[in-house]
Amino acid sequence: MSDAILGATQYLTGCHMSRADPSRSDAGPQRPVTWRRSPAKVLLGTLILSGAHMTYVRYLSASMMIGLVLGCSMLVLVGCDKPGDDGQPAQSKRKGDLTRELAAEILNEYLAKPSISELEFKKGGIDRALSEGVLVKELWNDGVFQHTRCRFTDKGLKMIGSFLAPGSDKIEMEAFGATAFGDSSPMLHLKSPIGETVSAVTGITMDPVPTVEFTTAYALPAEMEPMTRYVFSGLNTRAKFRKYDDGWRVLSVDR
């Protein structure tokens, strides 16, 4: 304990400490420390030292709180300008050229909400499903004419039955001996829409309107995956874009 601290302690507490002077050669053994206590001074010194300790604790706590607030503020500021994959801020990246990578990113945001409520049979998909026991043909009469239609077998219903809209387990194939669909393919109607994502951007044209050609992949439930042997699992389409002050946006998607 330094002489200054010793003196302050003695003054505040009223305790007097005596010790030998080590500079003297005849000092001999050091005398034990002796204390003369003054209760009033001891109490006053204790209160003063306690107050100084609490002040230091408050100062330390306030410093830590200020540091924490400043640190969080820096994180918020950095997060507001999150860089893109190439190091550019995401918002600035959207204001640049319409690349395939950027187009796919914007399209995936646009397509995020599930919107696919129908699945189209591939060319030859009906015949394949018939040959593999997923569908079976049957005749039915509406009271006037006889029709041919397909319905799902138990095997087919295990794949897709729980996802079909009510009444969609039968597909009308013929009316008066001709296909009921003309040039279009029969469709499966789903009970609830499913989502899709961009699997590839196949081309971009800028004239006369920025247009992106792309393919999608449907977010099919695992149970429906075998049905992709008979129905399309994605779409080939295109979207129109426009550049605004805050970057590129999708105007429309062809369906």
Image (cartoon, grey):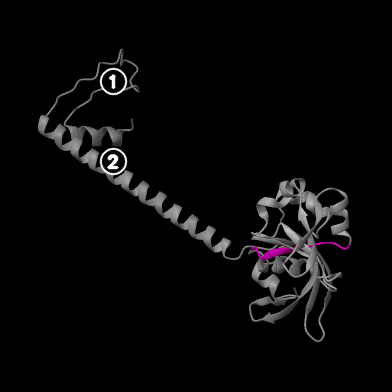
- Residue 194 vertical placement versus 161 (above, below): below
- Secondary structure under badge 2? helix
Residue highlighted by disc 1: 20
Q: Residues within 10 Å of mark 2 (few under 14, many from 20)?
A: few
Residue 229 appears left or right of 194: right
Answer whether residue 117 is magenta in the image. yes
**Residue extending furthest toward the top:** 29
Residue 192 appears left or right of 172: left
Upstream in sequence: badge 1 or badge 2: 1
**Residue 69, how many percent across, how many down?**
44, 56
Answer whether residue 18 is magenta in the image. no
**Residue 23, how many percent across, how many down?**
35, 23
**Residue 238, how many percent across, how many down?**
79, 74
Depth-wise, is mark 1 or mark 2 nearer the camera? 2
- Residue 51 vertical placement versus 240 (above, below): above
- Residue 129 vertical placement versus 172 (above, below): above
Magenta highlight range: 114-123
Type of amino acid at the residue the image marks with label 1:
Ala
Instruction: Please state which of residues 155 and 239 is positioned toward the viewer in this rendering.
Output: 155
Residue highlighted by disc 2: 53
Instruction: Please state which of residues 202 and 23 is positioned toward the viewer in this rendering.
Output: 202
Q: CA distance from mark 1 to mark 2?
A: 32 Å
Type of amino acid at the residue the image marks with label 2:
His
